[in-house]
Image: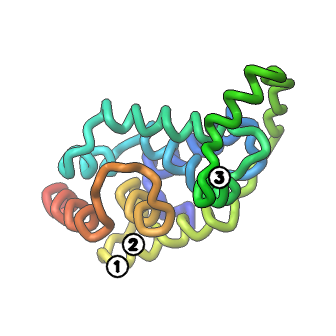
Amino acid sequence: MFERFTAIARMTVVGAQDEARSLADQHIEPAHLWLGLLQHRGVAGEVLADCGVDADRAAQLADQIRRLRRRVGIDDADTEALLAIGIDVDEVMRSVEQNIGAGNPPRSPKGHIPFSRDSKRILEGSLREALDLHHTYIGSEHLLLALQKNAAFPDWNLDYLALRKCVVQRTRKAG
């Protein structure tokens, strides 16, 4: 499947692996794919700009994602479960660091970092998005659509259908 990826889409995936490594995560999660996408914007960046998400807002979102990922030992599902019962994980982490200390930083994984099941679903979804749009390649715009559809994180008040409409308009202009 990766042979269909454009250069920017490949850089997005490599960027996701780099983000996972820098955050000492053992798997590439959808949050890492978001970070890779926000770093290597390509057509996805143009689409986001068309839809009102500028580079500054994208950088703010990337910082927010990194901050959330730095929670050692707490994954996205744990965070959501705790938030659902009213526990602010950021506040708990600040309190622990204040009272006990930050502890030893986790070790970055060596070598290949595998994709999580959710990230594999995103990558497969990007292929479906490309096929649905009758494109012969998988670009950053297809990754963007798959991420928004399956792992919506950024708070840019843009739903999947509005984003897809921006992708269709942008790719028509380019084609």
- Give the alpha-carbon distance from disc 1 to disc 3, as whole Å: 33 Å
- Give the alpha-carbon distance from disc 2 to disc 1, as whole Å: 5 Å
Relative horizontal placement of residue 52, taking residue 67 as reference (left or right):
left
Residue linked to disc 2: 129
The residue depicted at 63 percent of the width and 35 percent of the height is 91
Can the viewer see residue 29 in this picture? no
Q: Residue 79: which numbered mark, if any? A: 3
The residue depicted at 65 percent of the width and 52 percent of the height is 79
- Give the alpha-carbon distance from disc 3 to disc 2, as whole Å: 29 Å
Can the viewer see residue 99 in this picture? yes
The image shows residue 80, relative to residue 104, as above or below, that is below
Q: Which quadrant of the figure has residue 30?
A: bottom right
Mark 2 residue type: Glu
Give the image location of residue 117, x and y in percent. 68, 67
Mark 3 residue type: Thr
Q: Residue 116: which numbered mark, if any? A: none
Residue linked to disc 1: 132
SS under mark 2: helix
